[in-house]
Image (cartoon, coloured by chain):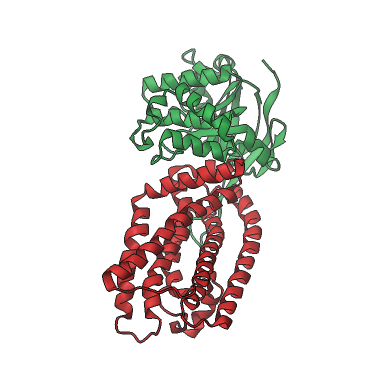
Amino acid sequence: MAFFQSIFYNVLLQFKMSLSRPMYRFTLIVSPIVNTMLIFEMFRKSNVSDAANYIVFGSGLMGLWSSITFSSIGDISRERYIGTLSTVYVAPLNFNLTIFYRIIGNTILSSMAFLISIISAHLFFKISMPIYHKYYFIISFIMIIVSFSIISMPISYLMLISRKSSLYMNMIEYPIFILCGFAFPTNKLPALIRFISYVLTPTWTTKLLHESLHKNLDIYQINHAFKETILLNLIYCLFILILWKHIDSQVRKNATLEVV
Amino acid sequence: MDNTNIITITDLTRIFKNKTGWFSPTEEVTALNNVSLKIKRGTIFGLLGQNGAGKSTTIKILTTLLLPTSGNVLIDDLDVTKDYKEIRKKINFIFGGEQGVYKRLTPLDNLIYFGNLYKVNTHTLKKRIPELLNQVDLYDVKDRLVENFSKGMIERLQIAKGLINSPSILFMDEPTIGLDALSVRKIHGLIKNLNDHGTTIVLTTHYLKEVEELCSSVAIINKGNLVAKGTPDEIIEKYATKGNDLESAYISIIKGDS
């Protein structure tokens, strides 16, 4: 019971803290609308068969990535500057749990970005996406949320050991949009950098989502994307465990929790 | 009063390795050099020193934020290097200034959040938060955003935050920095009251009058070295040259050591 209460209060306060920031509100509400427009313009004269999927869900995925990962990671940087990171870090509640609760809070809120991009595509461009296989779609969506949450944990840890975290945070936002195929298919990328896409879970969850939207499902492709997502998530979890032990001692050795 | 030591520091050294660029050599800065100290349970202990003397580094090691480079630090017989998780349940800390609280939340939300971080159960929190807010005179503004508070109000909220887990030791790093006289008086009253209820307080400050008023024992650190320790009276008697106060003793110690 105490465990669930702790989750409830942490998530609730994460809502309040996130929504109180103008930049977060912009990322959550305005960004998906602008991104929908930009992706629509990108595909207006293209011959990509599933362009509508990219217009409707591309901006949703971009909003989701920005809100979940960017905000959860951004919290570390912000807390360092407002002087609360040290308290959060040394408090008896496991720091991993604190990060996890924040990701849950941001995840719930960021689903709104997804919804806003669907609504804006419909309102501005009269594009609607029929969902033929709702269970596949729901599973894909859950996999996206879980994968984005998992990938944001090790990045948050890395932000702990460097005071330049806000710089890195800005550096990783747009490359992920491109590398993971949020706005256009990854086969448009140069072959030389495609291997980076293959080791990032968002690439496979995006593929899973797109496959689940086809009227005629390609079960082989769905299985492949699903297995890759699970495998990469397991590897990331293992990496998180190993990384945490190292980060925990490095943070106390190098005094990186505060601004100098 | 229990006369045992709650904090024992033996030969504590902390060296920072600074690198200014990728290709520049690593520069070593000794923030603390073989410092040994004992702090008695239930006292208010003052740690004095110039800017960059090593006070905050000492506090950060004691609060498990930093690892010592060498030496041994025991808090209630627990080692800060190995038993840091146990230590964190028994202590809390406040860093002076306007940082350390969420300004876009209310005091109530801040205390609920920090209470959860310190694993205080909801039933206890419901009772403790109004008590703490009353104690620091913030109950009437519990639903106002902290960003609208004065420095003094933020500092009092920090004290409430520092007491959320009823710690045995409260570390306060310059708690009255930049406050007006009335706010300082209020904070001093709170510190004395806490100590009367058995909390050991370790305080760093630049205000020598504050130390004279509050602390039963004092240590002075200069350039990472412990240069004097004792009760304020002992230090005045031994080192004061011009006036019969701590300021005179302090200046003579720092000048004599440079």
Q: Residue B42, relative to residue B58: is it above or below? A: above
Q: Is residue A118 above or below residue B12?
A: below
Q: Quadrant of residue B199?
A: top right
* Relative side of A249 to A53, left or right: right
At horizontal 65% and vertical 58% (from top left) the residue drawn is: A241
Q: Residue at x 46, y 44 (%)?
A: A13
Question: Which x, y percent locates residue A63?
Answer: 40, 63
Horizontal side, residue B67 vs residue B172: left or right:
right
Residue A55 appearing in the image: yes
Instruction: Return the x and y of residue B192 as percentages of the image width and height.
Output: 52, 18
Which residue reaches farthest right?
A: B77
Q: Nearer the viewer, residue A199 or A1?
A: A1
The one nearer the camera, B211 or A190, is A190
Q: Is residue A167 visible?
A: no
Q: Which chain is green?
A: B
Tell which residue pokes out farthest to the bottom in this image: A47
Relative side of B191 to B1, left or right = left
In the picture, the quarter occupied by the N terminus of chain A is: top right
Q: Which chain is red?
A: A
Q: Position of residue A116 (x, y in %)?
A: 35, 62
